[in-house]
Image: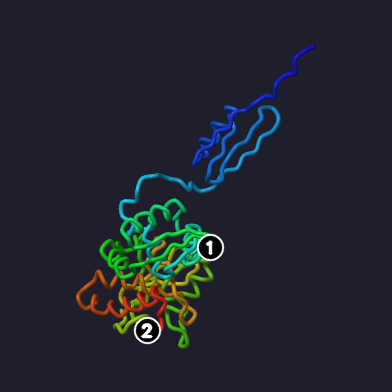
Amino acid sequence: MAKKAGKQRFPLLIAPYLSPANLDWLEKEGISGIDLSGNGVVTIPGEWLVVKTGAENQYPSSAPIKNIYRGKSSLVCRALLLRPEYTSVGAIVEALRDDTGGATGVTQATVSKVLKSLEEELLITRSGGSQGTSISLKQPGELLDRLVRAYVPPKQSQTLRGNPVEQSTERIPIAILADAARQAGVRYAVNTVMTYAPFPGAEDTPIYVESLAPLVDAGAVREDDRFATVRLIETSDPTAYFDTRAIDGMCYVSPIQIYLELANGTKRERDISEAIRGRILAEANGTVEEAK
């Protein structure tokens, strides 16, 4: 009696992340591979093939972040100042996306690294139990001070000083350009100190915009260095758009961003920043009424 042939087995590679090039190589070699980020290729040579790619690397590196209080990683710290308690790493990632109005480039792996450093420095506590995980900010004042010391302004691509082409006796220039930015699908944030504290306004109001080209191409603004009422600052830095506040139908820069700029400015600016600091800490402590 002839022996039954055994089931044929096929190799499967499992990794934290497989790049498109890795997946192509695996497919050519007839090897299946899946990663923990959501990509993969599953193949039975000559029979069927399934390929999924495009998911972001959730495990880019195990190395610690050099400075968690600067750049994209600082968004995790800012998120904790806005809402001092979260139930998971994923909840922070979602909050960052929602509060920035778009992609931040901050992965779960980045959030985990930042939280690990904050926990080691005793700025947060983490606990788990039958009721779920708790991530809690314990020293908001110290966290804010560290953000000040590490602060770097949003990287600018270009600036344009000018005026909106549309003239109106009923709407101010920044309102006209804010409306133009919305129509063009461009993220923006009006950057004025007096939104949160008494401060003389500049001749040309600064406005962060994600891209100048759509506004220029649409003919919404004309350049005018001598009599400019607005200064459009092109930047894709997510720190410029995190936690923007809707006031009178326009998006204004977060009080955290305003505070960090002032706290790194002149003595007068640093003095004015203290009022905004009080507001931020009141929000972090759940006593926002005291900051009004």
Q: Are marks 2 and 1 in contact (CB under 8 Å)?
A: no
On screen, residue 253 versus residue 29, left or right, reads: left
How far apart in space, not on screen, are marks 2 and 1 (Cα)? 31 Å
Identify the residue under disc 2. Answer: 290
Residue at the far front in the pictured view: 130
Check the image and tell me how it is coloured: rainbow
Q: Percent from the top left, x then y, of residue 204?
A: 33, 77
Q: Residue at x 55, y 36 (%)?
A: 23
In the displayed structure, 29 sits above or below 279; it is: above
Out of 120 and 252, give the one closest to the viewer.
120
What is the three-letter code of the residue carrying label 1? Gln
Q: Residue at x 25, y 64 (%)?
A: 149
On screen, residue 189 versus residue 4, left or right, reads: left
* SS under mark 2: helix
Out of 2 and 179, give the one closest to the viewer.
2
Quarter holding residue 274:
bottom left
- How many residues crowd around disc 1 within 10 Å: few (fewer than 14), some, or many (20 or more)? few
In the displayed structure, 110 sits above or below 195; it is: above
What is the three-letter code of the residue carrying label 2? Glu
Quarter occupied by the N terminus: top right
Out of 261 and 173, give the one closest to the viewer.
261
Q: Residue at x 47, y 64 (%)?
A: 86
Identify the residue under disc 1. Answer: 131
Q: Percent from the top left, x then y, of residue 52?
A: 60, 42
